[in-house]
Image: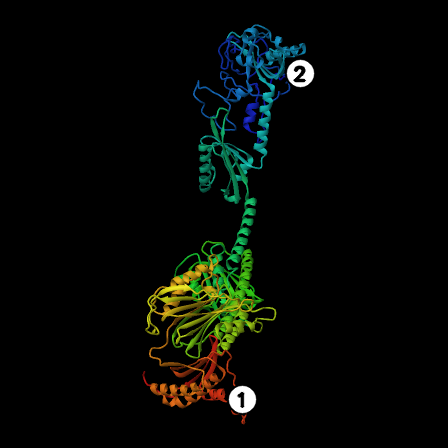
């Protein structure tokens, strides 16, 4: 391998921006003083040798001692001699004993700051850069013989000290060409004082080793010259040079601001990018802390991060802060990490600073849009299932505070709030507006004045509200003059807004079907930034979504009001209180989240002081369900007037299902329970069509005393009546069956619809069991029992209508006169019946009814004797009317005939129809009962 050399070594100077460290580390031996010609001794002015600054005695061959590089020897270089080429960058090792001068000046830390205090003299140093480069030192005489061979040289080449001292260095050179070049280098050093270049030596194993060599001329006190040879492995030197070059390129050419700070957190280096960011030159940074170069508020935060990194060693990466320099407003991303040397000693921290203003603004813009979209989605989810205009208005007002505004108000047309039709004419100052939604970031009397819920809003036609209502064009208001024109001059609400510091307001229309149905007013106060066009566009989008929801709520309220009105008109307007039955009822429409249902109940008085109790439920909701319920209730009442048994009545209603259905393509589907109670016999007959079973509560103690109306309920033992289920009306396939029960005095019967006992997550039996438990308790009245049942409804139940009918069953009023007989089916039964009726009415003191009663009883008993073969029953009951009942075992009802003038018979039922107040027939057991009533006509019956 060829070697290159430089006798004088040109002084290298760095250009602008080149790091001082690179210049120092790469600086070779520089000529600091004139060099003497070879062989000339350095001395005083007379040429005599003497101690001069920088003179170094030649060291003796002390094994194990490492020589340090001295300063350049004195001498005067030949002015005409050409300078050799500058060698590759090498590490310079200054001589501590050299004469003070530029070369002997202590190297400064990288870059440009006075050196840090050295560690104590004699303190061990481990893990330095010299350990990496392994600089070897050898001392030669002028003939090239080894005088001193250091342990580092032995480690580099493997030759021990005892084998080389006294031998020529030529023995380590592999070929003669190299020998010649080394000898020339020695001669060049003797002339110029130093030489640097590459050389190829042979290690003890014979392998060539390329080294970066430095030869310096040494002169001892006697003027004897020696040569100091510094050797380092060339590959290691090249690696350090490459790392330094990369570091310099990154430091000076990086678009990131880079800073190096010592353990006192003072800048030791900054690059040009960071200096420009801070608007301070690099020189003004060096030696100062962050607090001395940046504004106080920003410096405190950054210094805290620097101290944390220096203390813990945990790096801080990509922390975004506002720019501390007012002239360059924006945002910066800072990162810091702790620096240590190879031995782990903390040297300080390094940091990078990146201007992320554009990125931050882009991210902020995206985040701003994301928050706006999140607000739209959140508002949509909050009002998606709401059908109440007032609640939607409040949700809208609450959604925009505080994310969009400080104060908000939602003002609606009264027609929207009440579910009426929208006005067909334009809006003017007479338009009725209600403030139904309000929200604010604060409380206080001014807020109460400005944002009072339910307040009626008035405005001038030329005001901002008037213009937006007429045109549907939103307005952005700012400044005192514009804000005073929101409603009308002198409005206390606007004065309150002024007192709150409101400085910006948006007046946005709420639209539906192209019609303005209200206004959304949002305002900002205090130091908050005023609204801009983006805020206006977003608020318009939010208001349009709210307008659709509000219009849906208005339409729902209108339909629900109509359905409720229809349903209420179809339900019983007055519930009678028949003899022997005390009735209480409740009807609860479904919640606001559902439509009105088809539940109904009825109490129907029947002849003979009997009472029919009915509860039914039409499947479905809305107007059509309510209308079907009305038709079904009418059909039941008509059939009940025929005094049909419960199972027969349900069968007839089922046969009318097609006519009662909601439409030709929709079949009727309804459930119903029908019960008839006869207080005279204390019998209850019940049948149901797919309905939930009734609940019967028997009194704890039986008594024969009649139950007084309004008396307390004593409680008792309840049970669910086990009845044949029957199919729902309109389904068919299952026959309807009736069950007859003997009822004790004071028993409580409960009929209800499934909305009372059904739940989303529980079985129907659980709800029925809860109903039984509630009804078993004692209550002050039957009305109180109704309230208790409703109070215990399952909270998670389906939002369905609830119909509840409670009936306390008794044996009639105390002292009601009643008489009855059983007669054989013989012709003599007619005369006997007349005598019994006459005597009984005379006993009761109603003799004025005797003639008519005898005639009608005679006709009905005659018919029974003629067509029946079993005993005949006659019963008289004196209440508000005189009730006469004739029973026989023949099931066929009597048929009224229109007899001709010449006919001798066929006029009996016609007489009954003409003379009785009313009459009828009903099935009872295997036979029938024909009955009629006579009005007392002012006759006061005698007491019993």
Quarter where residue 192 is shown: top right
Task: Quarter of the image for the C terminus: give it.
Answer: bottom left
Measured as percent of width and height from the top left, residue 552 is found at: 54, 65
Marking on residue 683: none
Residue at point 56% right, 37% down? 256
Against 134, residue 289 (above or below) is below
Residue 809 appears in the figure: yes
Measured as percent of width and height from the top left, residue 455 is found at: 44, 67
Residue tagged 2:
2
Residue tagged 1:
898
Left or right: 443, with 47 as reference point: left
Residue at point 56% right, 25% down? 23
State how many labels appear.
2
Task: Quarter of the image for the N terminus: give it.
Answer: top right
Measured as percent of width and height from the top left, residue 852 is found at: 42, 89
Residue placed most toward the observer, 786 or 353: 786
Against 586, residue 444 (above or below) is above
Measured as percent of width and height from the top left, residue 264 is found at: 44, 31
How many C-alpha atoms fall within 10 Å of the one at disc 1: few (<14), some, or many (≥20)? few
Residue at point 36% right, 85% down? 840
């Amino acid at each position: 391998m060829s070697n290159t050399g430089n006798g004088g070594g040109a002084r290298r100077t760095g250009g602008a921006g080149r790091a001082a460290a690179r210049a120092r580390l790469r600086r070779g031996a520089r000529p600091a003083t004139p060099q003497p010609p070879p062989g000339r001794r350095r001395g005083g002015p007379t040429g005599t040798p003497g101690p001069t600054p920088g003179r170094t005695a030649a060291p003796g061959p002390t094994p194990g001692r490492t020589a340090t590089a001295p300063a350049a020897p004195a001498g005067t270089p030949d002015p005409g001699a050409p300078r050799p080429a500058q060698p590759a960058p090498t590490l310079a090792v200054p001589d501590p004993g050299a004469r003070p001068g530029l070369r002997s000046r202590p190297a400064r830390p990288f870059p440009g700051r006075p050196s840090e205090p050295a560690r104590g003299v004699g303190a061990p140093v481990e893990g330095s850069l010299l350990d990496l480069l392994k600089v070897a030192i050898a001392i030669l005489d002028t003939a090239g013989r080894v005088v001193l061979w250091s342990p580092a040289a032995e480690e580099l080449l493997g030759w021990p000290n005892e084998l080389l001292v006294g031998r020529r260095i030529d023995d380590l050179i592999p070929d003669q060409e190299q020998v010649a070049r080394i000898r020339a280098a020695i001669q060049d050093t003797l002339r110029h004082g130093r030489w640097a270049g590459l050389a190829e030596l042979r290690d003890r194993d014979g392998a060539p080793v390329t080294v970066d060599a430095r030869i310096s001329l040494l002169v001892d006190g006697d003027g004897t010259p020696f040569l100091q040879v510094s050797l380092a492995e060339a590959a290691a030197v090249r690696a350090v040079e490459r790392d330094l070059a990369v570091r310099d390129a990154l430091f000076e050419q990086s678009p990131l601001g880079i800073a190096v700070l010592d353990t006192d957190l003072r800048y030791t280096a900054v690059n040009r990018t960071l200096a420009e960011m801070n608007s301070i030159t690099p020189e003004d940074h060096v030696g100062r802390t962050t607090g001395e170069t940046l504004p106080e508020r920003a410096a405190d935060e950054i210094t805290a991060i620097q101290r944390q990194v220096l203390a813990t060693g945990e790096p801080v990466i990509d922390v975004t802060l506002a720019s501390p320099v007012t002239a360059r407003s924006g945002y910066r991303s800072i990162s810091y990490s702790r620096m240590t040397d190879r031995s782990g000693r903390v040297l300080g921290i390094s940091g990078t600073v990146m201007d992320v203003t554009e990125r931050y603004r882009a991210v902020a813009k995206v985040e701003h849009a994301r928050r706006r979209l999140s607000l739209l989605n959140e508002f949509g989810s909050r009002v998606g299932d709401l059908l109440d205009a007032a609640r939607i208005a409040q949700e809208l007002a609450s959604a925009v505070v505080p994310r969009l505004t400080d104060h908000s108000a939602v003002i609606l047309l009264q027609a929207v709030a009440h579910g009426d039709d929208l006005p067909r004419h334009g809006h003017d100052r007479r338009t009725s507006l209600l403030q139904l939604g309000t929200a604010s970031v604060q409380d206080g009397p001014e807020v109460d004045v400005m944002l009072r819920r339910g307040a009626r809003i008035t405005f001038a036609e030329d005001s901002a509200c008037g213009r937006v209502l007429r045109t549907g064009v939103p307005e952005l208001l700012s400044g005192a003059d514009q804000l005073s024109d929101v409603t009308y001059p002198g409005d206390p609400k606007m004065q309150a807004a002024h007192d709150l510091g409101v400085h910006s307001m948006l007046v946005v229309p709420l639209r539906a079907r192209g019609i303005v149905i209200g206004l959304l007013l949002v305002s900002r106060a205090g130091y908050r930034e005023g609204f801009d066009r983006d805020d206006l566009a977003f608020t318009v989008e939010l208001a349009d979504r709210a307008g659709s929801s509000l219009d849906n709520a208005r339409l729902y309220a209108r339909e629900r009001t109509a359905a409720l009105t229809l349903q209420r008109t179809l339900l019983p307007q007055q519930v009678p209180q028949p003899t022997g039955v005390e009735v209480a009822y409740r009807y609860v429409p479904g919640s606001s989240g559902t439509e009105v249902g088809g539940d109904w109940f009825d109490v129907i008085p029947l002849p003979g002081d009997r009472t029919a109790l009915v509860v039914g439920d039409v499947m479905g909701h809305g107007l059509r369900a309510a209308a079907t319920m009305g038709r079904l209730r009418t059909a039941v009442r008509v059939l009940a007037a025929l005094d049909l048994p419960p199972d027969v009545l349900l069968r007839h209603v089922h046969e009318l299902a097609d006519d009662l259905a909601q439409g030709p393509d929709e079949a009727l589907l309804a459930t119903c329970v029908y019960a008839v109670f006869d207080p005279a016999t204390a019998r209850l007959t019940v049948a149901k069509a797919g309905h939930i079973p009734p609940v019967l509560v028997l009194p704890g103690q039986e008594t024969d005393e009649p139950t007084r109306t309004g008396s307390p309920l004593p409680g008792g033992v309840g049970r669910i009546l086990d009845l044949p289920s029957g199919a729902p009306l309109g389904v068919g396939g299952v026959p309807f069956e009736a069950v007859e029960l003997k009822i004790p005095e004071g028993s409580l019967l409960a009929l209800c619809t499934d909305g009372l006992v059904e739940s989303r997550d529980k079985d129907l039996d659980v709800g029925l069991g809860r109903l039984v438990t509630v009804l078993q308790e004692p209550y002050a009245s039957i009305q109180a029992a109704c309230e208790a049942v409703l109070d215990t409804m399952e909270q998670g139940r389906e939002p369905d209508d609830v119909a509840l009918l409670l009936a306390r069953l008794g044996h009639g009023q105390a002292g009601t006169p009643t008489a009855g007989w059983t007669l054989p089916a013989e012709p003599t039964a007619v005369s006997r019946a007349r005598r019994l009726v006459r005597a009984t009415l005379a006993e009761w003191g109603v003799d004025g009814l005797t003639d008519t009663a005898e005639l009608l009883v005679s006709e009905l008993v005659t018919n029974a004797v003629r067509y029946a073969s079993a005993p005949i029953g006659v019963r008289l009951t004196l209440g508000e009317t005189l009730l006469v009942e004739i029973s026989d075992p023949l099931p066929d009802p009597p048929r009224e005939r229109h007899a001709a003038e010449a006919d001798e018979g066929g006029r009996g039922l016609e007489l009954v129809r003409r003379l009785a107040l009313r009459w009828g027939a009903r099935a009872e057991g295997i036979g029938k009962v024909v009955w009629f009533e006579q009005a007392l006509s002012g006759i006061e019956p005698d007491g019993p």
